């Protein structure tokens, strides 16, 4: 057990190094987003990310991770996370979630987005994507409160409840996936602590400067339960409902927070939530 629960607190210099990795991931995901059109294969998206990361002189962190065979995770419709890119062709109306990680000088960045390919065929799919993104930003904003880590899960669950109360998902409950959670990140992709996306009794560690956390809620239009497919990677919803996943890598700095995988540090999205960021520069 020794050391396994220990949080790696970063200096501001180390956070700056992490930002370089974060911005490579942001560039890769921007390029992938532009390429996620009807007729593209999930493997095409992987190729796009591979090229952006290589051109930046960075290293993809998923490739080879516990034997994972690709640069991206591309998860379509009922796939929640860890979908393996390949020959699958994206169609108009598909919900696609793209997760990407990169390493620069030994420091990691990790980020994901979901989108609907082309025009949505069901408005509830767009609501799913938007609610999941809003849940992520609420979780990120909660890091600025200086309280405890459990504030993230509380904020996520609150946004999800409010969305359904406002009629999203036709008023049906969203599932908040519990089997996969956010995490500390830094000199490794996955570090303590775990970051839950739901309310929990354990309040978790105190939020302190130097913590870097990947905030990554996963929502479904139905059950929160998931299964892993025969390929040992692809996670699907147990009821076949569609899912979305958003993620950013965030640093807690002495004077506030900074989103390392967003070009503006999250300034715009967080200002809308009453949180100002602590610029790294
Ligand atoms: N990016 C995932 C996470 O957010 C991890 C993917 S690991 C891989 O934690 F091996 F599947 F790529
Ligand atoms: Co992650």
Image (tube, rainbow, N blue to C red):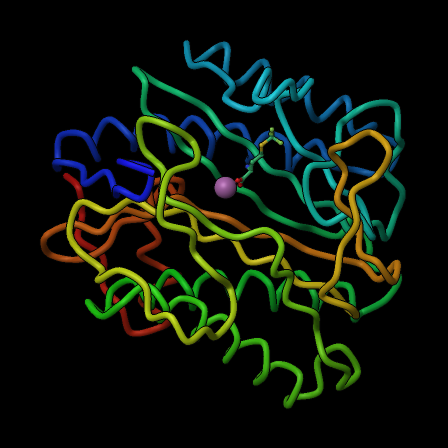
Q: How many marks?
A: 0
Left or right: residue 136 versus residue 151 is right
Q: Nearer the viewer, residue 162 or 267?
A: 162
Q: Residue furthest bottom?
A: 165
Q: Quadrant of the N terminus?
A: top left
Residue in the picture at 70% in, 73% down: 174
Q: Is residue 197 above or below residue 280?
A: below
Q: Residue furthest front?
A: 1
Left or right: residue 72 versus residue 78 is left
Q: Is residue 248 above or below residue 128?
A: above
Q: Is residue 17 above or below residue 114?
A: above
Residue 163 place in picture, x, y as percent: 61, 81
Q: Quadrant of the C terminus?
A: top left
Residue 131 place in picture, x, y as percent: 61, 69
Q: Nearer the viewer, residue 222 or 261?
A: 222
Left or right: residue 187 versus residue 169 is left
Residue in the picture at 75% in, 52% down: 116
Residue 277 place in picture, x, y as percent: 22, 57
Q: Nearer the viewer, residue 241 or 23?
A: 241
Q: Which quarter of the picture shows residue 120?
A: bottom right
Q: Nearer the viewer, residue 186 or 168?
A: 186
Residue in the picture at 76% in, 55% down: 226
Q: Which quarter of the picture shows residue 184?
A: top left
């Amino acid at each position: 057990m020794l050391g396994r629960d220990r949080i790696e607190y970063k200096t501001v210099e180390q956070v700056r190094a992490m930002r370089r990795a974060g911005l490579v991931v942001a560039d890769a995901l921007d390029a992938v987003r532009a390429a996620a059109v009807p007729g593209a294969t999930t493997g095409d998206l992987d190729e796009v990310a591979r090229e952006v990361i290589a051109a930046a002189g960075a290293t993809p962190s998923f490739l080879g991770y516990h034997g994972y065979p690709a640069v991206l995770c591309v998860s379509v419709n009922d796939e929640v996370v860890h979908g393996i890119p390949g020959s699958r062709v994206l169609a108009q109306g598909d919900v696609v979630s793209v997760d990407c990680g990169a390493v620069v000088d030994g420091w990691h960045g990790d980020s994901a987005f979901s989108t609907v390919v082309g025009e949505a065929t069901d408005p509830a799919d767009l609501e799913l994507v938007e609610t999941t993104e809003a849940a992520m930003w609420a979780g990120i904003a909660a890091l600025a409160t200086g309280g405890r880590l459990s504030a993230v899960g509380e904020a996520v669950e609150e946004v999800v409840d409010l969305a359904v109360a406002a009629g999203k998902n036709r008023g049906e409950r969203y599932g908040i996936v519990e089997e996969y959670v956010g995490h500390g990140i830094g000199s490794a992709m996955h570090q303590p602590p775990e970051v839950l996306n739901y309310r929990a009794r354990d309040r978790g560690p105190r939020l302190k400067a130097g913590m870097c956390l990947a905030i990554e809620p996963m929502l479904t239009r139905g059950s929160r339960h998931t299964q892993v497919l025969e390929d040992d990677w692809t996670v699907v919803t147990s009821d076949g409902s569609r899912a979305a996943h958003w993620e950013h890598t965030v640093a807690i700095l002495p004077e506030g927070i900074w989103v390392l995988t967003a070009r503006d540090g999250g300034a715009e999205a967080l200002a809308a939530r009453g949180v100002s960021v602590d610029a790294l520069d």
